[in-house]
Amino acid sequence: MPSIDTLKTKMLIETMILNGFEHFDEQIAPILLDQEKTLIDRFYLSGKALIDFAIKNPNLYRLLFGKKYAHIRQELVSIKDEDCSGFGALKQAIEEGQESKIIKKEESYQHAIVVWASLHGLASLIIDGFMDVKDIYHDIYDKMFETLLAGLVANKVKVISTIPFIKNILKPHSV
């Protein structure tokens, strides 16, 4: 039987995880769901917000997405939960892009995981210093965004975007 201190510690970690995800989701989900902005802008800005969140809150970010407390986190939340709003909002935005024929009509859940993994990978590289990218992460983010978007957009959009004056259609405008 676990000690009282062990149970208190677990409850504290659970509370930190739940509050941390609430804070994280408040930073990401509203951007993705803001239909006043173009879909491309929402993808771009929400990705930047995720990276900024990690940089400003590295310890909280590691608690939320790191391995150490994954067993506790998995008891509380899952990206498969509909109320996992950061990931859920990304999936919803991808589905919106699919409905408007901007994004390939493939499995939205898998698209969302690819985007999510890319963003979290870059965030981890930055905050954990595995590669010396802190000074150039804005450029790396822009390149990653361009590469991800090129993989997600529908073939019809790819063809249209090759017309010279339409080239900027796949670039974020609110940067």
Image (cartoon, rainbow, N blue to C red):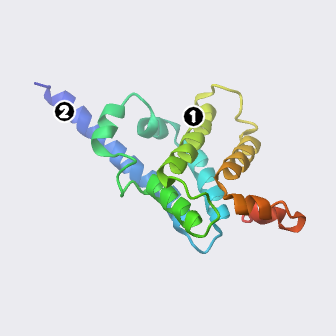
Residue lying at 19% horizontally and 29% vertically, measured from the top left: 5
Query: Please, which residue is most extreme toward the bottom here?
Result: 36
Quadrant location of the C terminus in the rendered image: bottom right
Residue lying at 56% horizontally and 49% vertically, measured from the top left: 50
Q: Amino acid at mark 1?
A: Ser
Q: Is residue 171 among the parts visible in the rendering? A: no
Q: Nearer the viewer, residue 72 or 114?
A: 114
Q: Is residue 1 among the parts visible in the rendering? A: yes
Residue 129: give x, y in percent of width and height. Answer: 63, 27
**CA distance for labels 1 and 2:** 29 Å
Q: Amino acid at mark 2?
A: Leu
Residue 121: give x, y in percent of width and height. Answer: 58, 36
- The quarter of the picture where residue 120 lies is top right
- Helix, strand or loop for disc 1: helix
The number of numbered discs placed on residues in the rendered structure image is 2
Q: Crowdedness of circle 2 by 10 Å Cα count: few (<14), some, many (20+)? A: few
Q: Earlier in the sequence, mark 1 or mark 2?
A: 2
Q: Is residue 68 above or below residue 112?
A: above
Query: Please, which residue is most extreme toward the right here?
Result: 164
Instruction: Read off the residue under disc 2.
Output: 7
Instruction: Read off the residue under disc 1.
Output: 124
Contact flag, marks 1 and 2 (Cβ < 8 Å) = no
Residue 159: give x, y in percent of width and height. Answer: 78, 60
- The quarter of the picture where residue 85 lies is bottom left
- Helix, strand or loop for disc 2: helix
Q: Crowdedness of circle 1 by 10 Å Cα count: few (<14), some, many (20+)? A: many
